[in-house]
Amino acid sequence: MFFFLYFSERVCNRLGIMVHGQLACLGTIQHLKSKFGQGYTIEIKVRSTDNDINVITIQNVQSFLLSQEQYHVEVKETTQSTGLFQIVGSTPAELFQLLEENKQRLNIETYTISQTTLEQIFLSFGKRIRATTD
């Protein structure tokens, strides 16, 4: 499935998503991302040190992001040295400023801020379908 979504993003001008045989949405990739996307995804990598210290460091980053009450933050995944977070209610500029101002204190080596992917939008439609049928 991921390959087809990736391929669709590269070659399609417009895309439709069907739910139970009905067209649920139709538009350009950017339109679908803007309308159905949920904020931005931040991937953070902390500076490599001892694995135990990395775990504590990524937990500190997680706690810091969750303490930002002006945003809705969802922890998607954490490993020993990386964290993946979904943030709603912010602009890329605000996120960039927040991370840059706290980069040294939180021991962040690198981070990326990206828009919601087409795959995440597709999966959110699947979750909505399951929620209505349960």
Image (tube, rainbow, N blue to C red):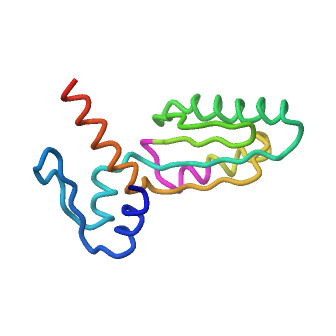
Q: Is residue 53 left or right of residue 62?
A: right
Residue 49, above or below 119: above
Q: Is residue 99 left or right of residue 24?
A: right
Q: Is residue 26 left or right of residue 44?
A: left
Quadrant of the rendered structure where residue 83 is? top right
Looking at the image, which residue sits at the far right? 50
In the rendered structure, does residue 89 fall within the stretch colored magenta?
yes
The percent coordinates of residue 76 (x first, y second) are 53, 37
The percent coordinates of residue 99 (x first, y second) are 65, 48
Residue visible at 50% across and 35% down in the picture? 73
For the stretch drawn in magenta, what is the main secondary structure?
Answer: helix
Residue visible at 39% across and 73% down in the picture? 10
Residue visible at 13% across and 54% down in the picture? 23
Quadrant of the rendered structure where residue 126 is? top left
Q: Quadrant of the C terminus?
A: top left
In the rendered structure, does residue 100 fall within the stretch colored magenta?
no
Q: Is residue 79 left or right of residue 104?
A: left
The percent coordinates of residue 47 (x first, y second) are 81, 47
- Of residues 31 and 92, the one nearer the viewer is 31
Quadrant of the rendered structure where residue 133 is? top left
Residue visible at 46% across and 46% down in the picture? 90
- Of residues 115 and 9, the one nearer the viewer is 9
Magenta range is: 88-97
- Of residues 26 and 4, the one nearer the viewer is 4
Q: Quadrant of the N terminus?
A: bottom left
